[in-house]
Image (spheres, helix red, strand yellow):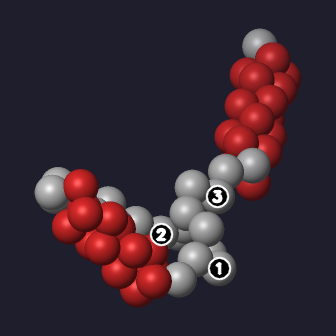
Amino acid sequence: MKKTTYLILLLFTAIFLQAQDQKPKLYNPDADARLEISNAVKQAKIDDKHVLLQVGGNW
């Protein structure tokens, strides 16, 4: 019984650690935020719309 429990624990630990290594990069680390915001504001003025900023990072 103990061997089965340890085996299951080891299996879940391995799966958990592997899943952490494969996180997708949601945000482009090379993006120029100032330029993108400036372009969005210019386009919003042309279209008479608002700009919504979503801020985040790859932690």
Task: Report the side of 42 relative to 32 (left or right).
Answer: left
The quadrant of the rendering that contains the N terminus is top right
The numbered dot on residue 57 is: 2
Judging depth in this view, the residue of 56 and 51 nearest the camera is: 51
Q: How many marks?
A: 3
Q: What amino acid is labelled 1 in the image?
A: Asp
First-in-chain label (2 vs 1): 1
First-in-chain label (3 vs 1): 3
Q: What amino acid is labelled 3 in the image?
A: Lys
Q: Is residue 38 above or below residue 5?
A: below
User: Is any part of residue 6 visible from this angle?
Assistant: no
Q: Is residue 26 above or below residue 55?
A: above
Q: Residue at x 47, y 69 (%)?
A: 57
Q: Quadrant of residue 46?
A: bottom left
Dot 2: element: loop
Percent of width and height locating residue 52 = 23, 58
Percent of width and height locating residue 38 = 35, 80
Q: Is residue 55 above or below residue 34?
A: above
Which residue corresponds to mark 3?
A: 25
Which residue corresponds to mark 1?
A: 30
Crowding at dot 1, Cα within 10 Å, few <14 / some 14-19 / many 20+, comes out as: few
Percent of width and height locating residue 26 = 57, 55
Task: Report the side of 32 relative to 54 (left or right).
Answer: right
Rounded to the nearest angstrom, the CA distance separating label 2 from label 3 is 9 Å
Labelled pair 2, 1 in contact (Cβ < 8 Å): no
Which mark is nearer the camera, 3 or 1?
1
